[in-house]
Image (spheres, rainbow, N blue to C red):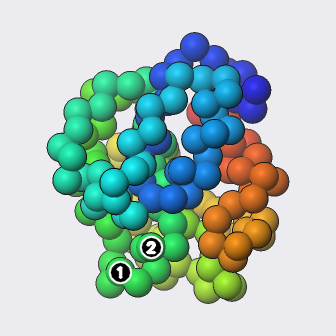
Amino acid sequence: MFLNFLFGLTLTIIGDSQGGIMVPYLRKDYNVIDEHKDGARVSGTCLKNLILKDEVVIIFLGSNHYDDNGTPNVNCVLKMIKNSKKCIWVGPPSIRGKKWDYENDFKNQIVNNCLYVSSQDIIDLPDGIHFGKSGIVQILNRIKSKL
């Protein structure tokens, strides 16, 4: 169990494939609702018009956002999660040594509503894009330190 302090809570995972990598690790010990599917970006989740009342919502950004000319649509996600107790955004890792240009802008957009966890320095990316096991553990530890 990675995050003992979350035991008994419901976690909802949204966002892109970075979230999909996390789901099997979290599902072992927690009630996890996996909403990251059906869209390779947060915008795919926004199209569902979900109302998430879960205790902790974790939103993953990933390499799909490197091609965007700005930050993803934060407002649609904030609307979906307004009834959740905690909101955590996990930023994308550096892809092949390239950092995400919009991380600071993004942090400024969500600072009053959600916690932000950077993954720009995680180097455990076996396929060059997605977290490996030690990267997953690093992200989970960062989430723990924010809560």
Q: Height in image: 66 above or below 46?
A: below
Residue at 24% across, 52% down? 46
Q: Horizontal placement of 147 versus 125: left or right? A: left
Q: Which label was assigned to residue 124?
A: none
Residue 35 in sight: yes
Q: Height in image: 67 above or below 55?
A: below
Quadrant location of residue 125? bottom right
Q: Height in image: 42 above or below 120?
A: above
Residue at 60% across, 23% down? 30
**Residue placed furthest toward the top:** 8
Residue at 48% across, 22% down? 10
Residue at 44% across, 32% down? 33
The spot of residue 47 in percent (x, y) is: 20, 53
Element at badge 1? loop
Question: Three-letter amino acid code at disc 2?
Answer: Asn
Quadrant location of residue 50? top left
Q: Quadrant of the C terminus?
A: top right
Q: Quadrant of the N terminus?
A: top right
**Residue linked to disc 1:** 68
The spot of residue 5 in percent (x, y) is: 67, 21
Q: Which label was assigned to residue 64?
A: 2
Q: Nearer the viewer, residue 112 or 6?
A: 6
| Mark pair 2, 1: CA separation | 8 Å
